[in-house]
Image: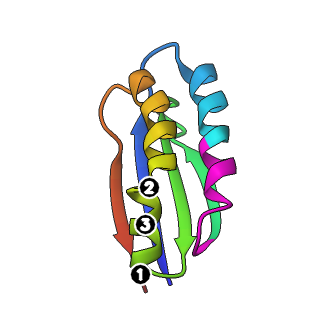
Amino acid sequence: MIQVLIERRIADGMETTYEREARKVIQQTYQARGFISGETFHDIKRPNRRFVVSKWRSVQDWQLWKHSEQRRVIIGQLSPILDEPERVTLMQH
C-alpha cells in the first residue's frame, strides 16, 4: 500500500470553484482501480493551499489513475484555477 500526497495552490478568489471541481475529481477517484481511501485538508494559515492524501493498493494502480484519460480531463478543468501545477509525492511506511 502507498499514500499519495497532492498539494495544490488555488488562485485568489477561486476557492469556491476549486471546491466544486475537486468534488468531481474525488467522485471519479473512488471508482479507480486500487483506490482505498482519501482525505482533503487545507492549510490553516494559507487557505488557498490544499492537500489531498489518498491510499492506493500499489504504485502501479496510482500510475494507471494518474495517467488515465479520465483524470487528465478532470485535472484539465482544475488546472486553470491553480496558481501553479499540483505537486505529487508518493509515500509508504
Give the distance between the C-alpha atoms of the residues marked 2 and 3, in whole angstroms: 6 Å
Q: Is residue 2 above or below residue 72?
A: below
Q: Nearer the viewer, mark 2 or mark 1?
A: 2
Pointer 1 residue:
92
Whether the residues at callouts 2 and 3 have beta carbons within 8 Å, the answer is yes
Position of residue 16 measured from the top left corner of the image (x, y, whole percent): 63, 21
**Vertical placement of 25 versus 12: above or below?**
below
Which quadrant holds residue 38?
Answer: bottom right
Residue name at image x 44 percent, y 27 percent: 10
Q: Which residue is mark 2?
A: 68
Q: Badge 1, how many Cα within 10 Å: few under 14, some, many 20+?
A: few
> In the rendered structure, which amino acid carries the disc numbered 3?
Leu
The three-letter amino acid code for the residue at tag 2 is: Ser
Marked residue nearer the N-terminal end (2 or 1): 2
Label 2: element kind:
loop
Helix, strand or loop under label 1: loop
> Which quadrant of the view contains residue 55?
bottom right
**Measured along the vertical axis of the image, is residue 32 above or below residue 73?**
below
Is residue 27 highlighted in magenta? yes
Report which residue position mark 3 lands on: 64
